[in-house]
Image: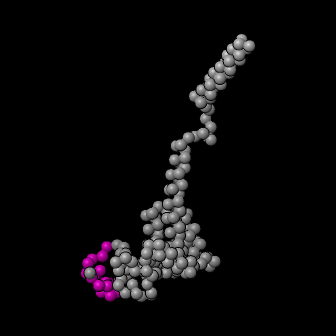
Amino acid sequence: IKMKLLLILILFIVIINTNAFNVFQSTSYRPFNKLYMGRAAAVRANTKARTDGAKAKTYNRFAKAIINVVKAGGPDPVVNRNLAVVLADAKAANVPNDVIKRNIDKASSSATAAFKESLFEFIGPGGSYILVNVQTDNDNRASSDVNLVGKKQILKSGSKGSVLFNFHKKARLDITGLIDEDKLMELCLENDINDY
């Protein structure tokens, strides 16, 4: 009986050592497999997802702006100065030409709903005044979303004009080419632009 137990024990040790050797071999050498690419692939995928999300947000913001401006003034940037400004800003933000052209074509079709600007007025902590300007195709949804954010930030919603009277809207003046100071001042005075 002792002899049988000894043989079984030896056989058991040999099996364990053989399995340990096989496990050692399989972990030290593993052929290339895409499923086992490691942590670096997950980090790259996560980084790519973050940058793609940021690009999508930027493209969507410019898409709304382009659609709004084209609906207001037409698809020609030479005639529509607001479109030229939006296109210049889009180029500066590295928006591809394909995305710009697609949104101009989309805005030119009659099936696309026009985005409207909505202005929301809030009174913040310490009596601070906050104006929120949004572009939307659905006023009810925009109103509920903006008011929800305002409540979360402990802002009091103001009635129309309760905050707006404290602000003065300024204009953007783009001049192409060379112009002397006297001619510029004359243009400003003709258009009731005050010098601050």
Q: Which of 47 and 86 is in front in this view?
A: 47
Indicate whether 92 appears above or below 188.
above
Does residue 68 show up magenta in the picture? no
**Residue in the picture at 36% in, 73% down:** 176
Tell me the quarter of the image containing the N terminus.
top right
- Which of 8/178 is in front? 8
Residue under the image location 29 percent in, 85 percent down: 194
Which residue is farthest front?
1
Task: Identify the magenta region.
Answer: 178-195
Q: Furthest-top residue in view?
A: 3
Residue 182 percent coordinates (x, y): 25, 81
Can residue 68 be seen from the camera position used here? no
Task: Please report the residue visible at 44 percent of the width from the left and 68 percent of the height from the top.
Answer: 89
Please say whether residue 186 is one of the residues in the magenta stretch.
yes
- Residue 75, image x and y in percent? 53, 75
Taking depth in this image into account, of 191 and 130 the one nearest to the observer is 130
| Count of number-bearing discs | 0
Q: How are the colours assigned in the image?
A: one colour
Q: In this view, does 18 lie above or below 87?
A: above
Give the x, y percent position of residue 152: 47, 72
Which part of the image, by quadrant, shows the C terminus?
Answer: bottom left
